[in-house]
Image: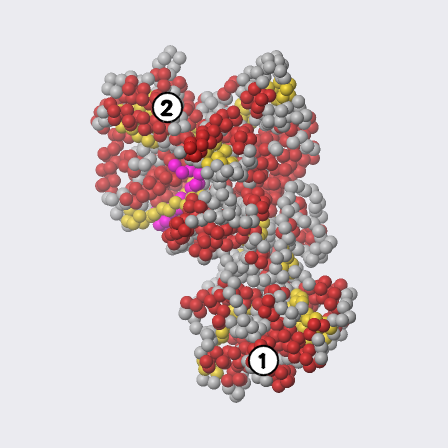
Amino acid sequence: MTIKELDAIRAAKKDLIAVRRLVKEEGEKLAQKTGYRKQVLVCGGTGCTSSHSMKVIERLESVLAELGLDDVLVVKTGCFGLCSLGPIMIVYPEGAFYAQMTPDHAETVVRKHLVKGGEIVKELLYSGTVTDSGDIIPFAETPFYKKQMRIALRNCGVIAPEDIEEAIAAGDYAALEKVLTQMTPDDVISEMLASGLRGRGGAGLPTGRKWSFAKASKGDVKYVCCNADEGDPGAFMDRSVLEGDPHCVLEAMAIAGYAIGSNYGYIYVRAEYPVAVKRLEIAISQAREYGLLGKDILGTGFDFDIEIRLGAGAFVCGEETALMTSIEGHRGEPRPRPPFPAVKGLFGKPTILNNVETWANVNPIILNGAAWFSSIGTESSSGTKVFALGGKITNVGLVEVPMGTTLREIVEEIGGGIPGGKKFKAAQTGGPSGGCIPASCIDTPIDYYSLIAIGSMMGSGGMIILDEDSCMVDIAKFYLEFTADESCGKCTPCRIGTKRLLQLLTKITDGKGEPEDLDKIEELANHMKQSSLCALGQSAPNPVLSTMRYFRDEYEAHIVRKECEAKVCKALLSYYIDPDKCRGCTLCARNCPVKAISGSVKQPHVIDRTKCVKCGLCESNCKFGAIERR
Amino acid sequence: MDMLNYKQAASRGNYRVKIMTEKKSCFHGTAAQEAELSAVIEESKHIPGCLVHVLQRAQAIYGYLPIEVQTLIAEGLGVSLSEVYGVATFYSQFSLTPKGKHRISVCLGTACYVKGSDKILDAVEKELGIKCGECTEDGMFSIDSCRCVGACGLAPVMMIDDEVYGKLRPEKVKAIIDQYREAKDDDQRA
Amino acid sequence: MQQQQKMVNLKINGISVTVPEGTTILQAARKAHIEIPTLCFLKDVSCVGSCRMCVVEATGARGLVAACVYPVAEGMEVRTNTDKCRRSRKLTLELILSKHKKKCLSCERNHNCELQKLSLGYSVDEDRFKGEDFVLPIDNSTPYVVRDNDKCINCMRCVAACNKQSVNAIGSIGRGFHVHIGSAFDRPLSESPCVGCGQCIVACPVGALSERSTVDEVWEALSDPTKMVVFFTAPSIRATLGEAFDMPVGTNVEGKMVSAIRRLGSDAVFNMDVTADLTIMEEASELINRIKTGKPLPMFTSCCPGWVKFVEQTYPEMIPHLSTCKSPQQMFGALLKSYWCEKNGIDPANLYVVSIIPCTAKKYECKREEMKGDVDAALTTRELARMIKTAGIKFTELPDEEFDNPFAVATGGGAIFGATGGVMEAALRAAAHMLDGSFDVLDFFSARGTNPLKEASYLVAGHAIKVAVASGLANARKIVEQVKSGEKQYDFIEIMACPGGCVNGGGQPTLSDSVRNSTELKEARAKALYTADATNTLRRSSDSPVMGVIYDDYFGFPNSSKAHKLLHTAYKADKKI
C-alpha cells in the first residue's frame, strides 16, 4: 500500500467515525453525509459478550432486515467501559446509551427508535443518562464518563476492531506514516523520552529510556515484544485495548521497531483471552494484507512483522525475563538481571518489552507531540492511566483518568460509590504486587510516586474497592495464596517464603495466631522483598505489608481477641438465627448439608454450633435475613 | 474442608498424587488424533521455542496431555521427555488427566473473590460431589478454578465450557448445572 | 588480532580489586581473598542465581544482589558481610531447612554437607519456619544412585549437570513450593534415559543424591570365612582417594591405597591397570582388524559403561561401531573367575571380587545380565574411603605397599586410562606398534589435556589413522551426530561419559564447594596419572610382562576365540527418551 492509498481509506471513512465522536446536531448533519442515518454500536468485549451481546446483535440485524432499514449501520465494537451494565448499545448520532440489553429490548429499540422518525426509548436507557425530571443527558456528561480522559482507550467502543479501515479512519497507522516519512529513529526516541511516558505494566520505567538502550545495543537481530499477559486477577485494561483497538498495538510496535532497528515483534497474550486473540489475529492478517506489516511498509523500505504467542497460564510470565523464557518455549522462569533485555533479551538478542496500554499511548504521542502528552497528568507522571475498577463499587468497569486524579474522585464520582450503603474501607491497587490504600489516604493523587509513598503501587491498573465486609487479613491471605500458587519456584525466598508467609496468615485467620507471628511475618516479608530473584517474589509481600501498615489493629484483633470484625474468617465466627426474624420456613434446615439446623414449621429455628461447618448455605438461602454471622 | 485446603488441592502440587494413583494408562488416542498432532509438530518444528505452542495444540486435540502424547511431542521435536514434562507441569493451562465433557471453571480472581466466588465453588463442589481439580465418575463434569476470565463486571462468574455465567449466587448453581444434565438425558433419549 | 580486555576497578569490603569486564562479584571477591557463601553455584556446571545465599550489597543495585551472577562495574562498592547480608542468608537457610529432611546423623553427607556447613556458620534456628511439607518417595530403582528428594534443596545443580551431559534424564517438575526434581512423569530413574554417570551426585551439595552403596555387602563378604575376597582398583583411584583424607588434590596415593585395602581384610589387592593394558591389546587388535577388513568404522571405545548405555538408549543404530571389548573392570572379573581361579584351584563360587571404581555406572555394568557375577561388588572411591574410615585405618599414616602378583605390574598406558584421551593414547601406542614394529612414538600429546573435544591424524604403516577424543556426553553426542551426518570421518574415537574422564567420575570424592569452585579439579587429578605414566619404565601395553604371561598362558593371542568368549561382549538397543 502507498501512503496515498492509506490517506484515501482514511478520508473515505473519516465522517463515519466522526459521527461517533460528536453528538446531536453536528452529528446529525455529518450522519447524512455518510449515508447512514443511524449507527448502532454494540459492545463486543468479553464482559458484554458474556452477558450475550451477540444475541442482541443478531436480533438487531434480523429486525432491521425485516423492516428494510438499510440506512442503519450496526457495528460490533470493543469495550465501552461500563461492564456491569452490559450488554451496552449506543445509538448515534443521538448518543443514546442503552444498557443491560436483551434481544427483546433490541427489537423494541429498532421498532421505536431506529425506524424513520423514531424516538429514543427512554426506559431502556442507562438510568444515569436520564435525569430525575426525565431529561436525557449525553452519556459523556454522566459522572462515570465526565472525569475520564480517553487516550489509550480512544478508539475502544468507537470503532469496529475487526475492520482495519475503521481503525485507519480513526487515526491508527497515521503515526507510523509520520514516523516512516518524517522522522529519524533518533527523533522517535527523543519524542518518547520527552513525553515522559512510563511503562503502564507495573514497574513504571520510562519507555523512551528502554527504547534508547535497545537502540544503542549492537545486534543484527533485535526484537520488539508486547506484554499482553495481563495476569493480575481482576484487571482487564489490556484485554479491552486488544479487543477494542488491536491495530494501535501493531502500529506502535512497528514504530518501536523502526526506532530501535528491529524487524520482528512478538505479542505474548493470555490464552484466557480468546476474543482478544482472535481480534489480534484478524488485525495482523489485515495489516499484512494492507501492507502495513511485512516487507517494505508504505513503500519506505522498512520491514516489520509480528507473531502471536499464547501464554499458558503462569502469572510470573508477566515478568519480562520470564515472558521471554516462555516465548523461547521453556518453563517461564525469570532470569537474573543484568544483563537487561535491552542488551540481551529474547533468544539472547536486544529486546524491548512494553505492555499493551503503554503501546496504546504511542500513536497519540507521535501525532500530538511530547509536549501535549506531558501536559496531561502530573509533573512526574504524565498522561493518563486506565484502571479496571472492580469489587464493592457501583460502576464496575474500565476507566481512564489523567494521572493525579484522586482515589476519591474515582471511587465516589466515577465509580458511583459503594453499593448497599456500605462504607469504603480500602482500595487495592497493583494486584498481587500492590497494596491497599486505606480510607485515610483517599485523597491521594494517583501517580507513580504517591502510590509507592503510601505503600502501594500503580501496578498494571487493577483497582479493587473493598468495603466494611472485607477482612483485610483475609485479603492479604487471598493475594498470598495467589502468589504462592504462581511462584515459579526458582529462588528460595519466593518458593518457600510465600508458602511460609501464607501459613502464618492462615494461622491467624484460623484463630491460632500468636503475637510474635506479626514480627515473623514482617521479617519474612522484608526478606522476600530484598532477596528474591524477580519482581514477583520481591513484590509478593506487598499486600501483607501494606495491610499490616494500615490495618494492624485488625491483625491484632484476630490474634488477641480472636475476632474478625468483617465476619469473614470462618474459624472466628458462628452462625446464629435471629428468632425475631425467622419465620420457620424450614428452607435453611432442609438445605443444611450437616443437619445442624432444627426447628418446627413456623417456629424459629436453631443452629447447633457443634455440628455447624459454617458453609453459609443457610445464610444465602434465607429469604428473611434471619441468619447472622457473629 | 476449609477454603485453603481445596485451593491447595487445585494448585499445581496435587497432580502428582493423581499420577501415583493412576498408574495404569487409560489412554485411548486415535490414529486420526495422532496424524493431526504429527502435522502440528511438522509445521511447528522450525519455529524457535515452539514447545509451549505444540503442547497447547496437543491439548486441544486430545483434551489432556498423557505420557503417550508427550512422548510423541518429545520425539517429534527432538527434545527430552523430562523437558516436555517440566513445561507441561509449569503452566496451569496444561492438564495431565482427562477433563469432563463439560468443564466448569469457577473464577477466583480478586473481583470475583471479594464478591464471594469461594462460596460458588463450594456450591459447585457440593452439587457434583467432587472437589476442584477432579472429574465426575461419569466423565460429565470436571471442576477447576481459574484466575480471572476478564468478566469482572459480572462478578462472581463461572464458565462452563465456553459459556460465562455471571452475577452468580450459590443457590443458582444447581439450576445451571441441571441444564447440562438434562441435555445429557435428552442425548440419551435421542 | 587479540582484543584488549577492558578492566574494571571496584572495591570489595574496602579492598580494591581490578578485574576484567564481565567478571561476577563472586569471582572478583575471590581475587580479594573473600569467599562468599554459595549453594546453587558450581563452577563449570551451574550459575543461575536462584538460591540467594550469595547475596551482597552493591552500589547501584536495588536490594541485595546475587554475587554469582551480578557483573562488576567500574567504581562499584561491594559489601559481602554486612548485617543485612548475614540476616538475609540466615533467613534463606531457615527457609530451606523448613522443608528439608533433617536426618543429618545418618546422612551420607554428614560433615561433608554444604547446607550443614552454612547452617552452623549462620547459627540458624532450623525449626523457626516449620510448616507444611510434602513427602516424596525415595528412588532407588537403579543399582547406582539413590535419590532422596526430601533432602533436595532445589539448587538445580544436578539438573544442570545432567543437561550438561545432554542426557536430560531429570528436570524441574511443577511450580512454586511444589517444584521438585525428577524424571518425566515422576517415573523411577530406571525408566528414564539416565546413563548412571553420577555427575548429578558429585554436583549435589547435600545428601539428596548418593550412590547406591554396597559397602555392607562387602563387609559381609570380608567377614565370611568361606569367601576369598579380592579387590582391584581402577587407574584413577590412586589420584583421588587422598582427597577423602584431606590430602591435596592430585596426590598419588597408590601405595597407601593398597595397604589400606589390605588392612580391610582383603585376600589380594590387584591393579586394574593390568586389564586396562589387556583392553588395549584387545581393542587395538580389533581396530586393526576393522581397518583391514573394512568392518564398521569409526570404532568407538567401550570401556565407559555410561557411554555404552548412552549409545544403547540414544543411538542404538551406532551399536555396530562400539568396540566389542569389555571394560577393564569386566575383563578383570572374567579373568579372575576363570584364568586365576583355574590356575590357583579356587572355586569361583567362593571368590568375591570387589572393584574400586571412580564411577557409578560401573555399579550398573557389573549387574548387566550378560556379565553378571564376574564382579560381585563395585565400590566408588567414596565408598572405599568410608570403609577405610570405619575400619579406623589412619590412611595418611600408612606405609606404601605394592599390588599383589600376578596382577601388579602394568604400563603407563594402563594408568592414563583414568583421564580423557588416555585410552586413545594407550591404544595408539599399541596399535601403531602392532602395525609397524619400528613405530616407537610414545607420547601422543594431541590426545592429552582436558579439552573436551580433540582430534588428530597419524600416519602409521601407510595408514592415515584419524582419531577423535571426546569427554562429556554432550560432546559425545556432537561427535556421533557429525559422524552420522558424514560431516566428519574418523577411524577411532574415544569417549568418556564424564567431562575430563574417570578422574572426574561420578564416584569420586565430593569436595567442598570452596575447593571445587577455586580448583581446576580435572587437570590436577589427571596430572597425577600422567606423571605416573611418564615415570613408568613400561609405557606401551604390549610391553607389559603380565600381558605376555596372560596371552602365553591362556588366551593365545589378542582377539582369539577364547579372548572373544571372555573379554568381549555384545550390546542391545534399548531406546529411551
In the drawing, what numbered circle is on residue A102?
2
The answer to whether the residue labelled 1 contacts the one labelled 2, judged by CB atoms less than 8 Å apart, is no
Span of residues in magenta: A255-275
- Does residue A256 show up magenta in the picture? yes
Q: In the drawing, does residue C126 fall left or right of residue A116?
A: right
Q: Give the amino acid at mark 2.
A: Thr
Q: What residue lies at 54% left-to-right and 77% top-to-bottom?
A: C283
Q: Where residue A314 sits: x, y (%)?
A: 49, 42
Q: Quadrant of residue C440?
A: bottom right
Q: Which residue is mark 1?
A: C562
Q: Where residue A83 sits: x, y (%)?
A: 42, 27
Q: In the drawing, does residue A313 fall left or right of residue A509?
A: left
| Residue that extends furthest to the front in the rendered view of this protein | B189
Residue C474 in the image: above or below residue C449: above
Q: What residue lies at 44% left-to-right and 69% top-to-bottom?
A: C483
Q: In the drawing, does residue A42 fall left or right of residue C389?
A: left
Q: Give the amino acid at mark 1.
A: Lys
**What's the chain of the residue with tag 2?**
A
Discs 1 and 2 share one subunit:
no
Residue C508 in the image: above or below residue C438: above
Question: Disc 2 on helix, strand or loop?
Answer: loop
Q: Dot 2: within a 10 Å radius of its alpha carbon, few (fewer than 14), some, or many (20 or more) residues?
A: many
Q: Where residue A469 sits: x, y (%)?
A: 57, 24
Q: Quadrant of residue C143?
A: bottom right
Q: Dot 1: within a 10 Å radius of its alpha carbon, few (fewer than 14), some, or many (20 or more) residues?
A: some
Q: CA distance from mark 1 to mark 2?
A: 92 Å
Give whichever of A239, C550 is nearer the camera: C550
Q: Is residue A530 visible?
A: no
Q: Where residue C221 sits: x, y (%)?
A: 73, 67
